[in-house]
Amino acid sequence: MVETDELPDWVRCEDCAALVYGKRFLRALRVCPECGRHAMLTAHQRLEHLLDPGSAVPIDHVEPLHDPLEFVDSRPYPHRLLDARTSTGLHEAVVCATGRIEDQPVVAAVMDFRFLGGSLGCGVGALITEAAYTSLRLRVPLLLVTASGGARMQEGVLSLMQMAKTALALAELDEAGVLVVSLITDPTYGGVAASFATLADVIIAEPGARMGFAGPRVIEQTTGESLPEGFQTAEFLLEHGMVDDVVPRSALRPTLGRLLGLRSPRHRVAPVADSPPEELIGSQLDDLLERDSWESVRLARHPDRPTTLDYVGHLLDDFQELHGDRLTEDCPAIVGGPGRLAGLPVMLIGHHKGGPDLAERQRRRFGMAAPAGYRKAARLMRMAAKLGLPLVTLIDTPGANPGPDAERGGQANAIAENLRLMARLPVPIVAVLIGEGGSGGALALAVADRVLISANGVYSVISPEGCAAILWKDRTAAPAAAAALRVHAGDLLRLGIVDGIVPEPTEGAHQDHAGAATMLGAALTAALGELIPWEPEQLLQKRKSRFHDFGLAAKPPAGRGAE
């Protein structure tokens, strides 16, 4: 059977029943212009859409066991296979090829739901594994496009073993530092969802795509519960932290191109700042030691200060925000993802207060992250380590979320796990306190090789108000507490807590976002330029020494590492 893109003159949408002109439907990549429903694509249509023209090279078919159980239901299994092959023109429910997306090399494994519901059997398992090993051999990213109803029952427990087989193959890609991206299409269920589809570094879903281990009908029949509207859809999965983003079909190629272009900068020339590092990461001790601590607190909390996403907009090209902790939710108080800083691939993670709009600040929880936020950060840190990307963290939080839900979710453990993870992360880490640095909620992103602070930033074990209430028994004594806690940049530099101070525009970062971003970008490129040539062993040893020295009598000089 030969596939064709020919359609009738008019196509009726299966969701909204709108009539769409056939040629318009094709131009829209089979997306309904009325309701946005993404119609199913065949494997070859998907490859034609995603891969650069003329770049696809098929991967040879791997021959699996044929009818290993000699299975018969109402018809023999070999007859069902023959019908599927005849009707689709495919040998199996997945098609694999090497190619390029936006000129970035990739190995693609694309499932086709028409072939026995995209079921996972020995043939699919063999082809997914072969695609993974091709990716490993070529050292290029693997793209998995999923569409499946689950395991292939006619192959019994051998079908189940394909889940483990494919998981093992992806584990080898993890060990080799090869990027894996999943594109979830509708539907993706059962053994595919519970194996290679959700083991990728980045999981993207088309709008409306459904994914889960058990289908909604099974859940309702088993539990007797009625499921909420939109259950298991891409949008539901994004809200609950299971996927990184929901991307419409028209935006898939540029999105994938940005992700596939990530490369470790270990053997690249680091960006060079226009000014020497000592002028960018300044030892502004004389001016700042005289600063009023409470004034620093006030400026650090100014609602118009640049947020993490403001800095991202000014400093990073090709930024792709990634969402979710893969367990419970996408905490909006922490944002992160890969991008390019002056051409250098980095992973950036930061607290995000939400800017001057009160409703947005409330939605962002005023930058006070829940456990899911710290777990999301940890996931992105591990991805940075796998891909060899330097890590940049921007810190601006009053502290970790103190609510009962956060405690039930394991807030203390989430913070502790990040401290341990960052202590041994084998890539350069630069942390910058761009506003408030509140207690353990700030430290959870600040175990770094270089810790910098904006000139009007603060860093403290407790808020001045909290300290005043406990020790002064009077919250109005907060200015005195701020001074006693030594929270401002000058004191922190003198204590050796920070390595340098990032200048701000004369009237403060809140008055000139672009100017503040220019100064921050210069400081970051200078710090990364110093650290990137270091071998992982040197990074880990220096990081260990840095934090081991705090609190000991023989202290290193103030501003260590800033020279």
Image (cartoon, grey):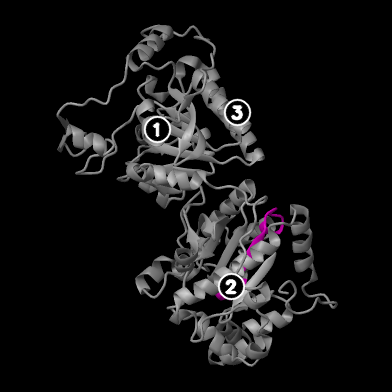
Report the residue marked by disc 2.
433
The vertical placement of 467 against 3, above or below, is: below
Q: How far apart, in angstroms, are the residues tagged by discs 2 and 3? A: 42 Å
Q: Which residue ends up furthest to the front in the rendered image? A: 274
The C terminus: image quadrant: bottom right
Residue 343, image x, y percentages:
54, 57
The vertical placement of 30 against 65, above or below, is: below
Task: Tell me the amino acid under the disc marked 2.
Answer: Leu
Q: Nearer the viewer, residue 284 or 308?
A: 284
Q: Nearer the viewer, residue 73 or 496?
A: 496
Task: Tell me the amino acid under the disc marked 1.
Answer: Pro
The answer to whether any part of residue 397 appears in the image is: no
Report the residue marked by disc 3.
133
Q: Nearer the viewer, residue 66 or 468?
A: 66
Report the residue marked by disc 1.
53
The answer to whether any part of residue 457 appears in the image is: yes
The region drawn magenta spans 422-439
Residues under numbered marks 2 and 3 in contact, where contact means CB atoms less than 8 Å apart = no
Residue 438, image x, y percentages:
58, 74
Residues under numbered marks 1 and 2 in contact, where contact means CB atoms less than 8 Å apart = no
Label 2 vs 3, first from the N-terminus = 3
Residue 345, image x, y percentages:
56, 54
Label 2 neighbour load within 10 Å: few <14, some 14-19, many 20+ = many
Q: How far apart, in angstroms, are the residues tagged by discs 1 and 2? A: 46 Å
Q: Secondary structure at mark 1?
A: loop
Position of 278 with respect to 349 (left or right) is right
The vertical placement of 519 against 347, above or below, is: below
Residue 362, image x, y percentages:
40, 70
